[in-house]
Amino acid sequence: MAIATTPRGYIERPRPSGLADVIDVILDKGLVIDAYVRVALVGIELLTIDARIVIASVDTYLRFAEAVNRLDIAEDGSSQGLPELIERMESGGAESKTKGALEGVKDKLFGEDDDDGGDGGKQERSKTRARSRSSSGSSSSRSRSSRSSGSRSRGSKNNK
Amino acid sequence: MTAAAQHSVYVYGVVSAAECGSLSLTGVEGAEVRKVEHAGLVALVSAVSGGSLTAAKEVRAHWHVLDEACGTTTVLPVRFGTVMESDDAVRAELLEPNAERLELLLREVSGRVQLNVKGEYDEERLMREVVMGSAAVAELRARLKDLPDEAGYYERIRLGELVAAEVGNRRATDTRLALETLEPLSLAVKEEELRQADSAFNLAFLVDRDGLDAFGRGVSGLAKQFGERLELRYVGPLPPYSFSDVELSSEAAWA
């Protein structure tokens, strides 16, 4: 895949988007129609595990504090949360740093072709990262973007 | 409604009938993508069985259909997971009541694409800069370094807050630089929310297809200015997701 990044990269041409690059855009943007049918999107929370980090939160502060504290330490085995999850899910791509690893996580999720609904184990793992989200198993199409579209919760018609 | 016997339909996006050629695309649940037309507007849809969709699988289909459609025409993407009751409902509750709005939006984005430019810090480098650049951070860090984790909980939060404020300043500066460079090369820009603690900025630009090369040179120049400090991710061309981010009303009297 052609990758447009710095500093390694060739950047004048955009990267032909991979799904992982645009997942947040796809989940959060676009026309919203208030009359659409409520359809259950099974496993939607798995898609958003890294898309809901609250920038100003105690978690972030602790993370930053940890990051500055370990500056001079070459190997720190006490990392928790994100790195731990990434390790467990095994990055697919060999890109550097968390970003590459995160995409590994996402590719893994998106690469699945079978039904995710019954995969309780995976959902459980994703919860370590989904603290700020209230994930509720198979959620409706609305509950996933509570922040950006509270207004979507009205005017629906049931399918059946 | 009389449409009860019809299939529910998954809705991908809206295009102008004048610009929309023939399609051969497979969508959600492997169904064929069709056109539902009303007064010059076309909704791209496919039949769904109703009930539930597996998000991880179908988001790929959604993305693929819009990506392909964007290659040949200007498409207004509809939010992922949108299902309507029938073709009739697509006409009566989407295309008809919103015709004016949709036509206006289509005109705004016609011949244009979205390009996303994200900046991401190298966290270690960023933290080093912050510690070197802020006496308050350096001092508190030195004080906390030897304390056990439990002892300094609130002070560690305080340290994190100080770091976050410094990071915030850098974000503001770097966002300004990115905008100064790229905004003049684009028709519109949206600042999107940041997703990760080491994000610097996440910008969506609306660019004429003809202006892609010039924009790319701008991104390249920007990358040089940021150097090793910040990694740029330049993604696209995309359908104008961020510039179609509006809520439409069905205004269906019988609904």
Image: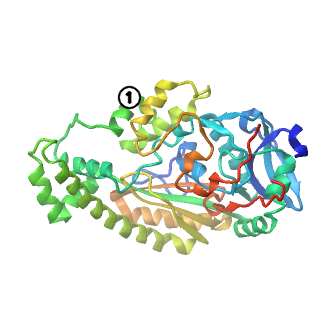
Instruction: Indicate the quadrant where residue B19 lies.
Output: bottom right
Quadrant including the N terminus of chain A: top right
Vertical comparison of B191 with A22: above or below? below
The residue shown at (41%, 49%) is A53
Kind of residue at disc 1: Arg
Residue B186 image offset from top left, x and y in percent = 58, 70
| Secondary structure beneath label 1 | helix
Residue A16 in sight = no
Residue A129 image offset from top left, x and y in percent = 40, 39
**Residue in front for this viewpoint, A59 or A134:** A134
Residue B160 image offset from top left, x and y in percent = 24, 55
The residue shown at (49%, 63%) is B219
Residue B253 in sight = yes
Left or right, B23 with reference to B187: right
Q: How many marks?
A: 1
**Residue in front for this viewpoint, B115 or A155:** A155
Residue B251 image offset from top left, x and y in percent = 78, 61
Residue at the spot of label 1? A88
Quadrant including the C terminus of chain A: top right
Vertical comparison of B34 with A55: above or below? above
The residue shown at (37%, 64%) is B171
**Residue in front for this viewpoint, A151 or B247:** A151
Q: Are there few (<14), some (14-19), or many (20+) residues within 10 Å of tag 1? A: few
Task: Return the chain for callout 1.
Answer: A
Left or right, B5 with reference to B115: right
